[in-house]
Image (tube, helix red, strand yellow):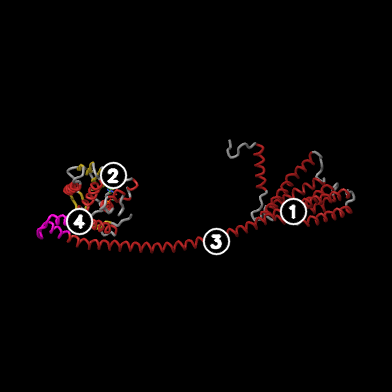
Amino acid sequence: MNLSQPNVSPIMQAYQSITAFLDKLTLPHSSVTNEEERQRSRLLSYFLLVTILISPAVVLFQLTIDRASLTNPDMIGAIIAIGFAFILYMINRRGRHTSRAAAVMIGFFAVASVIIPFLEDASESTLAFANVSMLLTGMFFARRAVIWVSAGVLVLVIIMNSLVPNLPIKVLFYYLIFSSAMITTFVYYIQYRESLRRQRLEEANVRLIQSEEALHALNSELEARVEARTRDLEAKNQELERAWEAAKKADLVKSQFLASMSHELRTPLNAILNFTEFVTMGMMGSINERQKDALDKSLESGRHLLSLINDVLDITKIESGMLRMFVETSIDLTDTLEAVQTTARTLLKGKPVEFRTHIDAPLPLITGDKRRLRQVLLNLISNACKFTEEGEITLSVINEGSSLLVSVRDSGPGIKQEDFGRIFEPFQQTETGIKHTGGTGLGLAISKRLVEAHDGELWVESEVGQGSTFFFRIPLQPESLTVSLQSVGGLTG
Ligand code: ADP
């Protein structure tokens, strides 16, 4: 079954192919571009084709049924029509349809006026040829021309009357008047419809032009607005860029200022701590119990202050990209872990908290900054000790082959999941952190960046009320660390 033409009967198919064939035969010449002209040209082609096709049938009919001779007026008329129509049809293919139409008219008129009147029984043929010329005039020329042609035909009939005695002039006269009235009305009607259609088309065209103009105006307005907005945005962008540059500069200046100030604070503070320690130890003469107690408290506060200054110094150095690491190969973390355990036990003194360790021995040697790794471990352990009131704390170190996985698990208050990201940002503390005075919210931020500087990662797993576990994993041979002083990049958060 042909899917492209479903349910098409053979008759329909034959009809379609005939019309397609006729369309091809009547196709106007490519030089005729105006749509109206093309329609007229096609109409004329149809007319000529029909004449070419029908006239032979008339001839055959006359010859076989009526047994007419070739000198019969109908026969002569039909033969003339075939020949004439054929010549015109061929000219038609050249694309000169107006001149062709005029030729048809003149030809038919000539046949009607000159040849037929002298033949026997010429009235019908005269009528037919006269009507055809009127119809063609209506098709191709102005309405007024039909009236002129009709008048011409009437004059012809009158002349014929005087030349051909046996012509039924009265009947012919009435027929001509009637047919010219019919044709004129028909042509008027067709042309009226055409002018109406053209008027509507023009109106639609005007509306289209108007809406196009409106659209154009709207478009230009929109373009202007977009341009203005773009200019605005560009200006704002430049402003923002300038502000961003200024902010970056200010940030750098602030970091540098903080770093140098913290550094300047550390030197006198260290001196204060050292001299206080000397006095406490009795190196500057004996002191009584009350004096020793007061000096111990001063020492404790001083050390706390020193650790705060150190943290501020570290974070500002990291932020400004000024923190340098001292990278060594073949570091053994055993003694560092022992020191961290000692600190943990000291911090947990008096608390019902059990401290456990699970360390894979022997530990592999690693590349990194030993002091900074100890700082990270101490921070995690001291946080666990600070926030855990009872239960246990476990420090574990697992050798994963190419990396070390360190974790500090506690049975403390735990951390809400929504705070998991925040606690690694500088100066951010949870409610628990704020309750415990003495914290700054810098330890984890520094630790995370130090671990990342070792190509590692630091993260937390926790549930409120169940305790927390802080993990960090560092490769044994960090790729980005070379054995030298290494700077740690600025903060991005
Ligand atoms: P600090 O301890 O000085 O406040 P940190 O950066 O070390 O600063 O920690 C940030 C915050 O993370 C703490 O204030 C605390 O709220 C939370 N935190 C850190 N460790 C723990 C822990 N082991 N248990 C519960 N909360 C913790």
CB-based contact (under 8 Å), mark 2 and mark 4: no
Inter-mark Cα distance, 4 to 3: 70 Å
Q: Amino acid at mark 1?
A: Tyr
Inter-mark Cα distance, 2 to 4: 27 Å
Inter-mark Cα distance, 1 to 2: 97 Å
Quadrant for the N terminus in the image? top right
Q: Amino acid at mark 4?
A: Arg
Where is residue 256 shown, x and y percent of the image? 28, 62
Q: Is residue 428 left or right of residue 178?
A: left
162 drawn magenta: no
Which of the pair 397/271 is nearer the observer? 271
| First-in-chain label (1 vs 3) | 1
Q: Which residue is tagged 1?
A: 192
**Residue 158 visible in the shown view:** yes
| First-in-chain label (4 vs 1) | 1
Disc 2, SS: loop
Where is residue 128 shown, x and y percent of the image? 80, 48
Q: Which residue is tagged 4?
A: 303
